[in-house]
Image (cartoon, coloured by chain):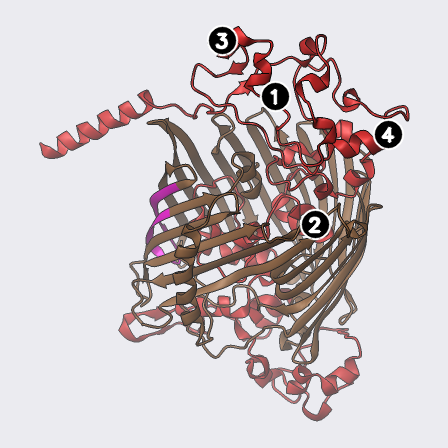
Chain colours: A brown, B red
Amino acid sequence: MSYQTVRSTCPHRPALGALVLLLCIPSSTTLAAGTLWGRSSTYLGGYVKPADTEEATYMPFMETVELHTKRLGVDGLSLHTGFWGLVDLMDRQDRYRATGDLTMLYLDYRVPSSGRLRFLDGLRFTAGRQFVALGPTVLEQLDGGKLHYLHRSGLELGLFGGVPTGTRFTDQAWSVDADSYDYGYNWVVGGRLGYVNLGWLAGGSSFVHRVYNDEVADNDLGFDLSYTPLSMIEIAGEGTLSLEAGRLKQVAARAAVHPHPSLSVNLGYRYASPDLWIPRVSIFAVFSEETYQEAHLDLRWRATRRLALDGSYGRRFYSQSDVADGQGGNRASLRAVYRLGNGGPGRAVGEVERLESPDNAANRVRLALALPVYLLRRTFRFIVETDLTVLDEPMRDERLAFNGGAFLEAPLIPSLSLLAGGSGGFSPLLKQAGSFIVRLNWDFGWFGGDAVEVRRGGGV
Amino acid sequence: MATKRYLLGLALLGLALPACSRLSAPSDRGSLIFSHAQHVEQAECGDCHGGVEQDRGGVAGKFIPGKSKCGECHEQELKTKCEMCHRGAKEGMRFVRPDRKLNFSHAAHLSRAKGSRGSKPTCTSCHPKGAKRAAVPGHGTCNTEVCHARTYAALRCSQCHQDMQRYREQTVAALEHGPGFKHTHGTLARQAGEACAQCHDQTFCAECHAATSPARASILFPEQVQRGFIHRGDFLTRHAVEASSAPQTCRKCHGQRHCRSCHALNGLAASVSDSLPGGRTRKAYHPAGWMSPGAAAFHGGRARQDIGRCASCHDQGGRSNCVGCHRVGGLGGNPHPPGWSWRDKSQQCRQNSMCTTCHPGGQGCR
């Protein structure tokens, strides 16, 4: 419900935000399709929480932009960037009126398969602010570089290094804790040596080394393996060993079976030591060695061309029996997705979920609809979203939480669309709250249709 | 009366909407009606696709003959029977030459590639003569053992595809996002991030995983009802259950200030309930018995079970509130778990800045 804006205690951040916001709109409106591709989204939102906190009303004006181009004059070279800016039009405290950030800005060079450097075909180098997901990292966002080489035999080598941009989502818009401890890492390096043969075998070994204030924060060794003995069966596993603690940080294993083209089954197991996710330089890293495990089963049945059903069950175990009464906890969910229209973006979604923890359990029902309506020679989209949560144990004397919303998306011209709508609800923590949003979206340079499908996660 | 008229108007509008609408837009792209099998009986490939054997760049539909070429045989039909070749011509649909963004050289393939029996390949090696449709050969044709099977197996998609962003995930079954993908995609990305990058830009990852964001993904993209956004709906109500159900999950993404700032704002930071100026109430976050050894809710047991939850509020380095009681000689005693071990424990106890907070000068180090 709430706009979880991220702000820093850095005094220059508001000025940076304003600058980004000013640059966003003109830069994104002068781009020609075909030369660049990307998306520009302009939002005006409102959020009202009729409660007793001071900062309960927001009216953020936001701009998010992503740009990609391959027209840099060098074959194989491309540039990618994403940034956002925000101004809170209702900011009462006059702190952080504007904020924003550069999400990514990196150069990507893939050695082309023809030309003078074709003997290096398979080599890729990225430099700048980027994401790295390699071995035992958790999608590290860093300012640095990454080198990746994939030989035609399937052997691959990846190395990365840089300065992480900070712990993810460290702050919130209404941060009142200006003097809290900063947990940014100073630098991180890592790599992976692996082998991939699609449809048969893939695996590798990896490492990551983080240093904070000249002290080792993490020193992890990772391993992963995926084996497909038959086309309908895949067995995979991964693990991370904390070299500092001498214990396993996490292990995951699964067997994926496809007994029928329309049926997929996953049997899996996870193990984690929660304390090892705390950097080794933290005082909290030395208080616990408890573990958490889960055995789970996931199913997907494509009942028809339009209808897909997902089911998931997990049994969780906690190593300290006195907290969980030795019972562990369950999670279970059912989800149905129905495609509406002829290959378009229409979907009807129904979800039922139960999640148990040692303290409480949440039961959730969600119904959502994105209905394409062809009207006046254009495809409009009508979106309805309802979400009900019922807690087993009351929170602030209440057990029910409900959130519902309705939106309409209208195409203005090809690639330009307007979305408007609002949502509201009640919850034990927020009591009542409501919000509205107006969004002007410009997708430029996409290839259309399936391209949006893949990029935007349009699958089931 | 006026209200009734408005309601009547709205009702009529509501009824009219479905009447003049359809659930899906008709396609605005036409397609060709063409049989290669019929044409190759009367012509050679080069008669219509002249110059293809010298072509070194792409297969962007540029070798589909134009009207003038077809007109050499179909002069009359060209003037009066558009629908003979163009499906959707009557509806005004346009035929758009397909561009599948492939890195492909006909010239290289015709000169270097080996045919199925070691002979020099011809057009029909990849484009069977009897094919009813004019189609780009699929993976089955390209990924034979003597051609690109290894390239495909090594996931070197970019050797043939300029990008994969125009294909549905179902196109390559091995890359399909199966059940429970929300839980497994991190593992898969760490194993084969390059495979993800074949289809997805990093901006796609950033929608959920960027260190900063103007708002939650489910707020920014309300129309994407099928995506498994973690914090959808009233996540605030569910977050405590989610956090303690899978203890390490939140910590993977969220720093301690994220939790602490919101808990403080919403009055959850105090040990006991109290009143705030303006008639507001601050409610206790910790349950009764939190500080009573032996009680079910005693903080020692809870901390062992989910230490990340404690750290989400209390991690202020040397100023953390656990230090006061649990430092060497403090009332709280030794907080390390039984059998606790660390690499070079004794040495680190004397040198690590965090250790020396409680073990000043190496006190109590073993």
Mark 3 vs mark 2, foreground winner is: 3
- State the CA–CA distance, disc 1 to disc 3: 18 Å
Say which quarter of the image contains residue A326: bottom right
- Choose the circle earlier in sequence order: 1 or 3: 1
Q: Residue at x 75, y 18 (%)?
A: B128
Question: x, y (%) of residue A114?
Answer: 75, 45
Say which quarter of the image contains residue A177: bottom left
- Residue at the far left in the pictured view: B1
- Looking at the rendered structure, the secondary structure element under dot 3 is loop
Say which quarter of the image contains residue A11: bottom left
- State the CA–CA distance, disc 1 to disc 2: 38 Å
Q: Is residue B86 visible?
A: yes
Neighbour tally class for label 1: few under 14, some 14-19, many 20 plus, Cα within 10 Å: few
Q: Which residues are magenta?
A: A417-439
Q: Which residue is mark 4?
A: B114
Mark 1 vs mark 4, foreground winner is: 1
Q: Which residue is mark 2?
A: B194
Q: Which residue is mark 3?
A: B81
In the rendered image, residue A342 lying in the magenta stretch gets the answer no
Neighbour tally class for label 2: few under 14, some 14-19, many 20 plus, Cα within 10 Å: some
- State the CA–CA distance, disc 3 to disc 2: 49 Å
- Choose the circle earlier in sequence order: 4 or 3: 3
The verdict on a common chain for dots 1 and 2 is yes
- Residue under mark 4: which chain is it in? B
- Choose the circle earlier in sequence order: 1 or 2: 1
- State the CA–CA distance, disc 1 to disc 4: 27 Å
Q: As rendered, which of A322 and B307 lies closer to the eye?
A: B307
- State the CA–CA distance, disc 4 to disc 3: 42 Å
- Residue under mark 3: which chain is it in? B
Tell me: A263 left or right of A410.
Answer: right
Tell me: B52 left or right of A180.
Answer: right
